[in-house]
Amino acid sequence: MAKKLFHLILTSLLLGCTADRAPGALFGPAAEPALVVDALLIVGQPLPLLYLRRTAAPGAVYDREVLAVSSAQVLIRQGRQEFAYQADPDSAGRYLPTSAPKVQAQATYDLEVQVENRQLRARTTTPPQLRVSEALLLDEQALTLKNRLKLFREVGNAAYAAPENQLRYLDGLLEVRFAPVQAAGYQVAIFSLDPASPFLVDADFVGDQDAGNFERQGNSPPLAATAEGKVSLPWFAVAYGGRHLFKVYALDQNWYDYTRTNPAENPGFGGGLAGDSFERPLFPIEGGIGLFGSASVDSVGFFVLPRN
């Protein structure tokens, strides 16, 4: 029981994510086939890939290839600029931008999808650029400063090797601070970057055979916007040694509403808003369902050492 509870809490608080999500599982069953769009714009990064499929009938096995939509006209507008997308011949239902300029902060992007006689529309306004100002290792009890980590803007990828960024597993509390921006909410994600790094969880209810059940990446439930401008990384979200990337996202309204109302991503552990209980996520999309949202992000890199 203890082992199952530990794994449940870990996976609930840090659910693995992927850009190529399955609408049948992600968005829930639909009364009739509906267009499903999936695209996330990140400030400072190129325009993203876009996925377009249809929902399956309730109870049917979801087949990505069968339900992929590959004959749509896809366009994203930002001000007077238009960015056309074309179907990827190597992946059914995936669309590639014909040009991929970087996503601008505090800008409005409109999506238009035409499939035969059906049209899908959506809009996102990107948040301001998020900037991490400090990454601190604190004493877990007294919350006094033990160490100040080096940031990427200071030393680049050498941050992983910096002595200040060598963290002993379960020692101290990692706190990341940033200047709050105008955003609907925040979300954090952790990525273990070394596939061969050792499994570090040492507990009576976790055996060597359980190591494969722990994800090397995941994200938190949504965090309501706060004036404090700080988030902490709980050690139970880390299961492996080696290099780790900790990301903080400032979310637009679409991304925030979808995440906090999707039962699959926000099952009620450690996040969301009081009273949130939804059978279906909120879809701010006209003519379909899915997620067309945006965020800005900054990150901290560190290296996890075994306890002994």
Image: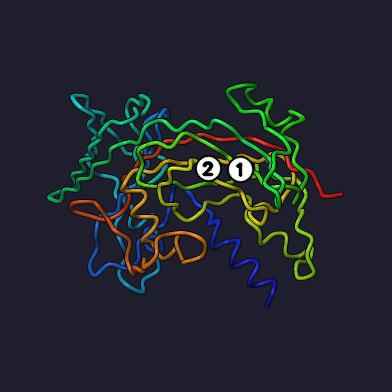
The amino acid on which the numbered mark 1 sits, given as a three-letter code, is Glu
The amino acid on which the numbered mark 2 sits, given as a three-letter code, is Lys
Query: From the viewer's perspective, is 30 left or right of 88?
Result: left
Up the image or down, 4 lies above or below 284; here it is below
Which quarter of the rendered picture does the N terminus lie within?
bottom right
The residue at 66%/28% (across/down) is 150
Element under disc 1 = strand
Residue 14 location, x and y as percent?
55, 56
The residue lying toward the viewer, choosing from 232 and 11, is 232
The residue at 78%/44% (across/down) is 168
- Disc 1 versus disc 2: distance between alpha carbons? 7 Å
Residue 230's tag is 2
The residue lying toward the viewer, choosing from 173 and 243, is 173
The residue lying toward the viewer, choosing from 168 and 63, is 168
* Residue under pointer 1: 175
Query: From the viewer's perspective, is 105 left or right of 236?
Result: left
The residue at 36%/26% (across/down) is 100
Up the image or down, 242 lies above or below 62; here it is above
